[in-house]
Image (cartoon, rainbow, N blue to C red):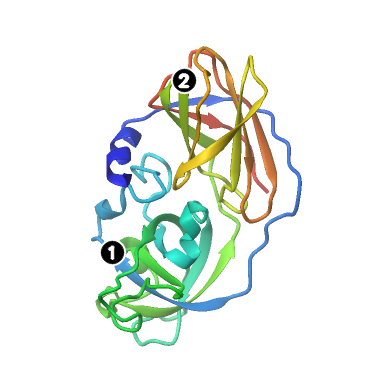
């Protein structure tokens, strides 16, 4: 499903609109450092990281670039880990670069289990392992890629974003599918609601990854969204994000600063 949806995310139009924002709940702060391992997939172009289980599509056009990672299922958490950010540094191996440089990556994909391999020899993403399968350009910032796998320290951190939350709209006038990107703070989404200019708040259900859907007649109405963070339960209200003549295939950006 990820590969078929990724084509919908390419060549997006970007429409910037104003929004009002309200917040409630705790401020997300970095977690303590923990241990894990990291590998990489793809090559230096990071072309194999495009698409992915979160539905972010072309990671260059959607703003994520190459500082990304696929998470083992423990961290991916059925898609609720999409958009979360981690600091990672290589430690305890000769392949680690001197000075232990730290890189911040965004979770954009799932590293699926490989049940044909033991978890300590090939099945690196098998539960209950915590593992990061990084893009090769990201991996090369912390270690010699010839090592293949290295021990790392990691911690969850607030997501550094530029611009505001982005909503890629798909579907039709009776079924709205919204991909949520560039969320600051915890970076993740637990629940989402949509409100048309002629409706109240409508609860949306998770479709897959970071996409949410509503089976309601919303065509011809301006759209507002409410998002609740999975990590902090903070609620963000983005008012009149998409105008009444919104179109599928376009990304609407709610410009806001995150702290």
Q: Is residue 237 visible?
A: yes
Upstream in the sequence, badge 2 or badge 1?
1
Residue 60 is situated, as x and y percent measured from the top left of the image, at 36, 44
Q: Which residue is mark 2?
A: 174
Tag 2–tag 1 contact (CB < 8 Å) = no
Q: Image quarter for residue 165?
A: top right
| Position of residue 27 in the picture relative to residue 54 (left or right) | right
For the point 53% across and 23% down, the residue is 216
Q: Looking at the rendering, in which quadrant would you find the N terminus?
A: top left
Residue 96 is situated, as x and y percent measured from the top left of the image, at 38, 80
Vertical relation: 125 (above or below) 98: above
Closer to the camera: disc 2 or disc 1? 2
For the point 45% across and 57% down, the residue is 107
Mark 2 → mark 1, Cα distance in angstroms: 39 Å
Q: Which element type, helix, strand or loop, lies under badge 2?
A: loop
| Position of residue 236 in the picture relative to residue 205 (left or right) | right
Vertical relation: 44 (above or below) 35: above
Q: Nearer the viewer, residue 208 or 187?
A: 208
Q: Which residue is mark 1?
A: 41
Q: Residue furthest toward the front?
A: 215
Please tell me the numbered disc located at residue 234: none
For the point 46% across and 73% down, the residue is 130
Vertical relation: 10 (above or below) 241: below
Residue 250 is situated, as x and y percent measured from the top left of the image, at 41, 26
Q: Which element type, helix, strand or loop, lies under badge 1?
A: strand
């Amino acid at each position: 499903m990820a590969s078929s949806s990724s084509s919908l995310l390419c060549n997006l139009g970007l429409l910037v609109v104003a929004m009002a924002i309200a917040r409630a709940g705790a401020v997300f702060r970095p977690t303590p450092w923990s241990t894990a391992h990291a590998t990489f997939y793809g090559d230096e172009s990071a072309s194999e990281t495009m698409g992915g289980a979160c539905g972010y599509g072309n990671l260059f056009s959607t703003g994520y670039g190459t500082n990304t990672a696929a998470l083992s299922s423990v961290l991916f958490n059925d898609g609720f880990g999409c958009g979360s950010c981690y600091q990672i540094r290589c430690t305890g191996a000769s392949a680690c670069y001197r000075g232990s440089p730290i890189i911040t990556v965004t979770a954009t994909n799932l590293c699926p289990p490989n049940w044909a391999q033991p978890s300590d020899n090939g099945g690196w993403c098998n539960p209950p392992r915590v593992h990061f399968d990084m893009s090769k350009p990201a991996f090369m910032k912390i270690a010699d890629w010839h090592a293949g796998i290295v021990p790392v320290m990691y911690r969850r951190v607030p997501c550094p974003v530029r611009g505001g939350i982005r909503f890629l709209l798909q579907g039709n006038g009776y079924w709205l599918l919204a991909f949520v990107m560039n969320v600051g703070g915890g970076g993740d989404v637990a629940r989402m609601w949509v409100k048309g200019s002629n409706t109240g708040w409508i609860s949306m259900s998770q479709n897959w990854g970071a996409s949410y859907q509503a089976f309601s007649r919303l065509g011809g109405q301006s759209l507002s969204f409410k998002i609740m963070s999975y990590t902090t339960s903070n609620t963000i209200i983005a008012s009149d994000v998409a105008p009444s003549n919104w179109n599928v295939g376009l990304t609407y950006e709610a410009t806001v600063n995150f702290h």
